[in-house]
Image (cartoon, coloured by chain):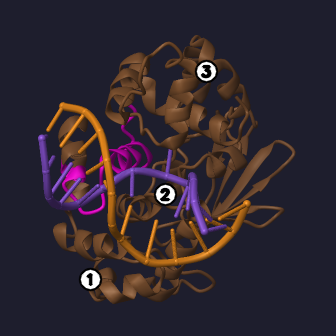
Chain colours: A brown, B purple, C orange
Amino acid sequence: MKYSIGKDYIEIFGKEDFNIRDILECGQVFSYKDMGDCYLVFSADKKAKVTETNLGYIIKTNSPKYFENYFDLKTDYGKIKATLSKFPILKKPIEFGKGIRILKQDLFETLISFIVSANNNIKRITLILNRLRENLGKDMGGYFAFPTRESMLKKDVNFYKEIGAGYRAEYLYKVVRQIDDNTLEEWKSLDTKTLRNKLISLAGVGPKVADCVLLFAYSRQDVFPVDTWIEQMYMKFYGKNEEKVLSREKIREFLVQEFGDLAGYAQQYLFYSMRSKEV
DNA sequence: TTCCAGGTGCATA
DNA sequence: TATGCACATGGA
């Protein structure tokens, strides 16, 4: 994909491998706002404004280098889609979500966000995360940064309950005490399996949340987050002749095996199309 | 009213 | 290793 970077912008040429709606609404991220004529994207303490143009997109931001990495602009999605399209069940999902790119999100923000996401709905997840930003995030003038671990350490369990986190309040209170400021960054050097186990050891992090953090923040593609939608997808395409429903762990093992190093991408196309009822 | 939302933690066998 | 249940909250 062709793009150019300036001091305060990135210009994307072409729309085949970059569709901001697909990217933001495919379920990998909660920190954005649909403004009608553009999207505002927030990550950690940074902001970008993404507007569609005749030729492609223009991304206005003070941190173009950061968002070049965030949007994973160096990866050739045409190639990934060509390879995955050989799987019959992926043909339609890829056509439907052809503009998806898997983001490289902030580690801490992704961890906290997906802990909040567990057994929750998108609307409420966004609400809780916005309250976190407004109460604990740095005022960046017009928007709030995602809270730092340090700012979250200052609050007790009650605070997290008051902003509507429900029983996840305990998890939030605990998790910021289980890691220090460098932990998540240091874990980057670990292999996927070891890293996954480290994540699962944290409060509020089980297999599904761990896989989401691995995929959407650590850029590990050899994972396959299995949730209610993927469960349905599995039953629809693979589980027809099975006597009893497989456990999520078994489904995960099968799908990682099936798609190998591209499992993460495959998952996102499938998830997006299932949730949009386009399969 | 009941069910569900991108599940996790814990007890039990 | 696998199964069952409780867990806050709000919308459909």
Please tell me the numbered disc located at residue A153.
1
Quarter-of-image position of residue A233:
top right
Q: State how many labels appear.
A: 3
Q: Are marks 3 and 1 on the same chain?
A: yes
Asked whether the viewer can see residue A149, the reply is yes
Q: Is residue A150 left or right of residue A141?
A: left
The 10 Å Cα crowd at callout 1, few under 14, some 14 to 19, many 20 or more, is some
Give the x, y percent position of residue A177.
19, 74
Q: Position of residue A224 (x, y in %)?
A: 41, 34
Near mark 3 (Cα within 10 A), the count class, few <14, some 14-19 or many ≥20, is some
Residue receiving disc 2? A66
Q: Which residue is mark 3?
A: A90
Q: Does residue A128 appear to the left or right of A4 in the view shown?
A: left
Residues tagged by mark 3 and mark 2 found on one chain of the structure: yes
Q: Residues within 10 Å of mark 2 (few under 14, many from 20)?
A: some
> Which comes sooner in the sequence, label 3 or label 2?
2
Identity of the residue drawn at 58% across and 29% down = A77
Tell me: A58 left or right of B4.
right
Q: Residue A149: name its quadrant.
A: bottom left
Residue range corresponding to the magenta coloring: A198-222
Above or below: residue A154 compared with residue A25 = below
Q: Amino acid at mark 2?
A: Tyr
Q: Amino acid at mark 1?
A: Leu
